[in-house]
Every structure is written in C-alpha cells, then in structure tokens.
Amino acid sequence: MSLQNELIQHIPRLRRYARALAGDAVRADDLVQDTLERALVKLDLWRPGSDLRAWLFTLMHNLFVNQIRAGGPVHCELDEASDVPVRGGQADALAVRDIHVALGKLPSEQREVILLVGLEQFSYAEAAQVLGLPLGTVMSRLSRARERLREIMEGQAVVKLQVVK
Amino acid sequence: MSEITEDDMHAYVDGLLPAERRVEIEAWLAAHPEDEARVRVWRMQNRGLHEAFDSVLNEPLPLDMVRAASVRHRASRPPWRAAAAALALVATGLIGYGIGVRGQPAAMEYAALPRDAALAHVVFSPEQRHPVEVDARHAGHLVSWLSKRLGHELHAPDFQAQGFALLGGRLLSGQAGPVAQFMYEDKQARRVTLYVRRDGAGQADTGFRHAREDGVEVFYWVDRDLGYALSGAIDQAEMGRLADAAYRQIGR
C-alpha cells in the first residue's frame, strides 16, 4: 500500500477525533485538512516503520494547541448540537447531546486525553507520545478528566430533573 | 495479588490489562463498591463517546482531504502548472469582475470534474484490500444507497461486452455535495472508474469531452442533472469505447 493510501486510511479517525475535540464540524474538518497538509510537508521527518497514526495525531495536537494559543474558539458544541446524528430514541439523542455539551466544558488538555484514550483507544504511552507529556502527567490528566466529566454530566442530569419537576 | 492502584482501574476500563490482572481487578471491585461505581461511570463515558462520534467514521471522505493527503498527485505536479492555474484564476477573476459574469462558479466547477474524477481514480483504483466500500455482490443495494445519498436515481452501466465487470462503489464528498464512484475491472486487473455527481441545475447537457490528468484518460459529460467522468489509465481509444457504452446506457 502506498504512503498516500495509508494517509487516506487514517482520515476517518482523524475526523472523528477532531469532531469531538473542536465540537464544530467545519472547524474540525479544517483541522484535519491542515493536519494532512502539514503531514505532506513534513513527510520526510516521519520515520518509516514508526506509527503513522500516532504521528498524525501529534501533528493535529500541535495545530490544535497553536489555535488555542492564537485565541481561537476552544470548543463550539452549540453549533453542532442541532445536527447531531441520532439513532434510536429521544433518550439517546439527549445523551449524545449531553456529552457534546459536557466535552465543551472540559479544559482542552483534559478533553484531549480523555478522547485519545476513551475514543481513539490509544495506549497511555501512545497518548503521552502524541501529547509530548510524561506518562505520569497523562495518567493524572486522565483521572481528572474522568472525574470532571462525571461531575458535569451529573450536574446536567440534576438540572434536567429539576426542570421535569 | 499486588496492590490495586487507580491507574490499574483506568487500564481495566480501557482494556489495556492482561487477562490475569483483569481477574484480580474484578475481584477487587467486587469487594469495593465505591471503586466499582467509579469504574462503571468511566465505562459509560467511553461508551458515550463512541455513541456520540463513531458515526463520523461512516461519513463520506471529503475529496479535499483526499487531495490534501495525495502525495503522488502533489509530487507529480510541476511547479509551472500551479503557477499557470493561479494565473488562470486571476484572469477569470478579473474578467468576471470586469463584465459581471454570473454563473462563473458553475463553470469553474465543471472544469474541476475531470480533475476530481482523475484524483479519485488515482487514489482508489490501486487499492487491493478496500478498492470499494460496497462490492458488486450487493449491486442492487449499492446503486440504491448511492442514489439515495446523491438524491438522484443512478445506474451503474454494464461493461460486460467490453470485458469489464463491476467491482463495486463508494461514496465521496465533493465541494458541491456527495459523489459516487463505481469501479470496474477486466481480466487483466485493469481498472476504470465512473465518477458521478450532481451538477448545478440548468447546466446544459454536453457532448463528450476528453482530458488527460496525471496520466489518466478521462472522458466526461453532463446529462441532465448529473455530471459523469469515466477514468482509466488505459488506451484512449478503448476508454472512448467504454465511455460511449456508458453514455448510451445512461442516456436512456
């Protein structure tokens, strides 16, 4: 398989991660597009035989961090909430929307860790490589992210119960 | 049993532990309800993330991204061509501005038809493992699925008489909307692809046109609401015969 086709094989997962990271579909796809363009420019820096997926996610992480530093919007879950693809019933739709909103409330460095591990199923060592962090930092961020996400989701559930009453 | 740490419980949730360690964690959780409750919440979070975002994996690939990832395409494009394209853009822009031409975007999109089709051909036709998303064993499903996504009834032409059998098809996402690609193969494993997209309403039907893009022969035409482009890295005359057969079948 050519390197070109290998890159293309990774696009769907880059898009999934970017969608969850950026919230808004257009901004997410721009991030993927930028990542691919950067990857082509830097392709001779990638060592054949090493993990292409981890390398691509590293490039995306760097671009994402630069956007935040430049003062771009961190997460726009509200634009997305209206056209979340939904299967199943109303309850599922609400749950999916809840997680979009809750992710937007996580600090971006926690959101990255929980998405790389929980959604993209990177090992902790791979996530550390992608984020350029020591393993211990990844573990403590993961722990904080999961705890914070639980608090946010429970808070949303409480609000909803109050509305129902 | 060594001590159970919080890291172990995360690794348990994320499926990163060997089987024997899993058993130890499960025994621990059975005896520690608070930890068990935390682990259950983390699991639900992982599942929730997949439920919310896995559908992105099934969205059609945007052609722009395919192009961005397209190493060979980039590398084989001589610099003067990019410069010429930029000049052409400036020129059309000026003319458009000067005389207020409307419908310029449609004309430019039409020009992109053979280029986009050739790109999609070059990217997907060498694929050995996944040349198509839906293969020809499910031809009926393939055509109805692609028709639904394009919002227009499609037909996959039959090239048996020319020695090419349908392999299957895939859905892509072009700048103007969804795009269908049908792929065919002959006994020598040569492949041709038919690229079909919705074209702007009111676009006049055209006869055949021919282009050569990066060594790919492309015959393209517009028939009612659809733009077609047949691409293959094979002899121009043979491609012409295939395109002719497609045109006659689809036109009916």
Image (cartoon, coloured by chain):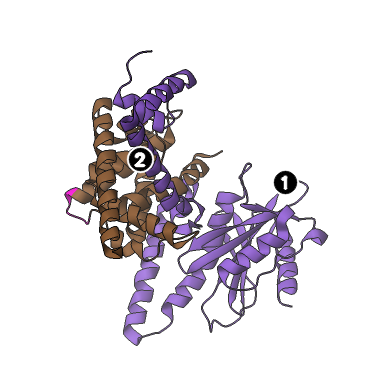
On screen, residue B99 above or below B207: below
* Residue denoted by label 1: B189
Q: For the residue carrying disc 1, how many other residues have a C-alpha within 10 Å: few (<14), some (14-19), or many (20+)?
A: few
Q: Where residue A101 sits in the image (x, y, percent)?
A: 29, 56
- The amino acid at mark 2 is Val
Residue shown at the point (38%, 13%) measured from the top left:
B1
- Secondary structure beneath dot 1 equals loop
Identified at 23% across, 30% down, the residue is A137
Dot 2 lies on which element? helix
Farthest residue to the top: give it.
Answer: B1
Residue drawn at x 23%, y 53% as measured from the top left: A74
- Residue B195: x %, y % from top left: 60, 63
Is residue B84 part of the magenta span, yes or no?
no
Q: Which mark is residue B41?
A: 2
Q: Is residue A37 left or right of residue B175?
A: left
Q: Which residues are magenta?
A: A69-73
Q: Chain of mark 2?
A: B
Quarter of the image with the C terminus of chain A is: bottom left
Q: Which chain is purple?
A: B
Q: Nearer the viewer, residue B152 or A52?
A: B152
